[in-house]
Amino acid sequence: MPVMGMVTISILARSLPKADFGSWILFLITYTIANFFRSGFLQTSLVKFYAGASSDRKLNVAGSTWFLGLLMAGILAILSVCVFLINKGNPATEIIIKWLAIIFFSSLPSSIGLWILQAEERFAQMFILQVVGQGCFFVSVVTLIILKQTHFQMVIYAFCTSAMLTSLFTMFAGWAKLTSIVYKSRACIKELTNFGKFSVGTSISSYLLRGSDTFIIKYMFIDPSFVGIYYLPQRLMEIIEIPLRSFIATALPTIATAMHQNDKRHMTYIMKKYAGILTILLIPVSITAFIGADLIIEIIGGQKFVPTEAASVFRIFMCFAILLPVDRFFGITLDILHKPHLNMIKVILMLVVNVAGDFAGIYFTHSIVGVALASILSFLVGVIYGYIMLKKHLNFTMMDILKLGILETKLALIDLPNKLRQKTENAKV
């Protein structure tokens, strides 16, 4: 799905005028911040309290999540109307304000459905749902190109239509459990809210950690094209996000179940296993991407991005990519240990270091390369803080993660021929 998302961004980068592409990036950032607020407040909470629970408890958690999701959509709608009435900005800004709440509400059923499927470890259905969502938008963009209607407002319409169709599909498939809202309870809503108030801070800070670079670049550089130049390698980080999201989606309900069973030893094993395997696997991926950065940028962004600093920024991103698995798994483990405030502090600390580093990097390098360099220090600080905090509750070392990662990767590679042979035999039967 991230690959399909990158292809869609690549098509838009080639098809939209630079100004419209910049407006589209601004909308994506705004919408993603709103969506991060929702998912940060509800997703981890739902998975934590839903996974491994009884049937009645699951309905209670799902219904309470629906209530909070609708409440948040209503609040955003009111805020959007107020801002729209007082806004005197450019037409692109008015479009963003007008459609933000509508798209936010339209995507609610598919978002809750995806979280429930994750908690139930139904990954095949998660994949189908993501294919429908990304596929609808991709087809819509291609249709706009064929009809020669590729401008900012039409892309917004396509995005909104895709969100509506995906949510309708989710509800008809029964994955969103809309009827569970009748099983909501004040106690569960309070429980989700108490946990979510910290996890939402983590999610917003996490997105600002990436989005802050864009806003600082827009503020510090007169030429608006620098935003698109920096955003392209940021988007290409999906190369790393592909396995990272998959492993986290798989590990999160398993870690939550182990926590419900008060089995910290198994929790530690799962965290070390997934973080270690991903770190080992990402080393050759990062090296390959580093070497082929110029070609990758040209393929995705086209010739107009070749003379820019996009390839240099992408190479810097690949240098700290191997820190991402450990950083991310330290964060979700703190959440499941019911220490979401520590995870929030970790991400806020990274954000502060990143913002300070951005300004310092621009001051000394006078280019967006300095902004990218600040990210290395930011993630290093996050890993160190997360390790110190987790060591107080779990028994492990950084070397344990690497050793287990190497061992599990070797075992997986040795067992791979047998699994492929078994799948071939099953297919024949």
Image (cartoon, rainbow, N blue to C red):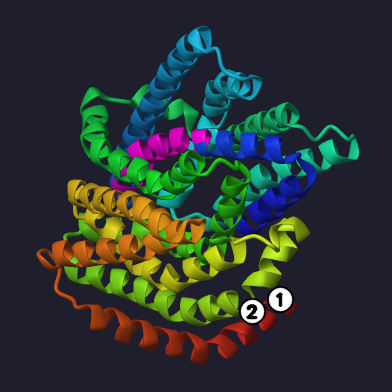
Dot 1 falls on a residue whose secondary structure is helix
| Mark drawn on residue 423 | 2
Q: What residue type is labelled 2?
A: Lys
- Are circles 2 and 1 on residues that touch, CB within 8 Å? yes
Residue drawn at 57 percent across, 21 percent down: 102
Is 31 included in the stretch rendered in magenta? yes
CA–CA distance in space, label 2 to label 1? 6 Å
Give the left or right position of residue 172, taking residue 31 as reference.
right
Outermost residue toward the right in this view: 147
Q: Which amino acid does label 1 sit on?
A: Ala
One can see residue 163 in this view: yes
Q: Quadrant of the N terminus?
A: bottom right
Residue 162's place in the image compared with 118, above or below, is: above
Judge whether residue 176 can be spotted in this image.
no
The percent coordinates of residue 91 (x first, y second) are 65, 19
Residue 113 percent coordinates (x, y): 50, 40
**265 in magenta:** no
Identify which residue, 148 or 420, lies in the foreground.
148
Classify residue 31 as left or right of residue 15. Answer: left
Chief SS of the magenta region: helix
Q: Name the residue under label 1.
A: 427
Going 58% across and 25% down the picture, which residue do you hit? 96
Q: In this view, does 32 lie to the left or right of 328?
A: right
Query: In the image, which residues are magenta?
Result: 30-48
Vertical side of 356 occupied by 68: above or below:
above
Instruction: Classify mark 2: residues with Cα within 10 Å, few (<14), some (14-19) or many (20+).
Output: few
Picture coordinates of residue 257 (x, y %)? 28, 57
Q: Is mark 2 on a helix, strand or loop?
A: helix
